[in-house]
Amino acid sequence: MSEAKIYLTLLNGTGYVFDVDDYMTLRTNHRIVGAPVGTANSKGWSAHEATLPVELTKYETQLLIEKGIALIVCKSQALTTPPTPHQLEAYKAAFEARLTSQAETLKAEKLRETERHLDKIVAGKRNKLLKQGNAEQAAALTPEQVLQEIADNFCFERQNALVEVPCAHVDRHTAQLYQWPQLDTVQYRVFRDLWQRGKFVTTGDAFGADFLIYPSDPLLYHASHIVIVQETSCIRPLDFIAKVRLSVTVNKSCVFAYERSSGGEIVYQTVSWHNPK
């Protein structure tokens, strides 16, 4: 087994990915999708603008650990320790420097944009002064004065500053390897079996199912199947009808999965809705 190179951070009882390169490796090489739960929007989190970190399901986390692809570490001790006064001052100074850099960049861009249209802006200001009866001021107005006025009146609104995306921790800190409590459920065994068959598998909560199966990366394709995990091969008729009709409504095939009592083999039964005319 090759040495694990990807480190997952233990948060909320599961693994999180903070490094973009690690996430792309998991997604492209190992078909692990997770769910981005971070935000780069100062107005709050949005599912359409979500970014790092990526929260993995417990099934994804265990699979990566079990396959030797990743290790999971706990950083709670290091990251919950109060910062020293020196560390706090250094953080505040770095934060202020980032905001100042954003303000200077925005101001420089605004002045460059003004210079591109300076003739029209000066002409507009002169016409305004003439309409106000200030002919002398209009004649004396120069492009340099207009640029200086815009520079002096520039104001950077901090609430509009770019929010940093949480990525890999840049400061030195310690972490402890975490002993992952093994899941021993039929749901996990179905998830692992589907993954080993080369499928992209995600949680199916939004569709009232256990899992969703995609023909390839979910960024490129819609899910093709919903998977309902059963403890046994038996299912109540009304539950059967409800699940199958749900799959038809969302335009997906319905798969029932259960574990054979002898041998532990995972069995799949796909149900298709047929409407003869």
Image: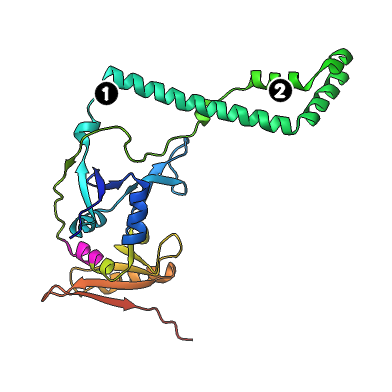
Query: Residue 108 location, x and y as percent?
Result: 61, 28
Query: Residue 66 location, x and y as percent?
Result: 18, 58
Q: Residue at point 14% right, 60% down?
A: 184
* Residue type at tag 1: Pro
Q: CA distance from mark 1 to mark 2?
A: 44 Å
In this view, the residue farthest toward the left is 262
User: Magenta residues: mostly which secondary structure?
Assistant: helix
Query: Residue 53 location, x and y as percent?
Result: 35, 44
Q: How many marks?
A: 2
Secondary structure, mark 1, is loop
Instruction: Please tell me how crowded label 1 is: few (under 14), some (14-19), or many (20+) other residues with Cα within 10 Å.
Output: few
Q: Is residue 42 visible?
A: yes
Report the span colored magenta. Answer: 185-192
The colour mode here is rainbow
Query: Looking at the rendering, in which quadrant would you find the N terminus?
Result: bottom left
Q: Residue at point 13% right, 48% down?
A: 179
Q: Which of the 4 image quadrants contains residue 152?
A: top right
Is residue 189 covered in magenta? yes
The label on residue 70 is none
* Residue type at tag 2: Leu
**Disc number lying in front (1 or 2):** 2
Residue designated by label 1:
83
Considering only order in the chain, which callout, 2 or 1, is on the residue closer to the N terminus? 1
- Residue 227 drawn above or below residue 33: below
Q: Which of the 4 image quadrants contains residue 232?
A: bottom left
In this view, the residue farthest toward the bottom is 277
The label on residue 147 is 2
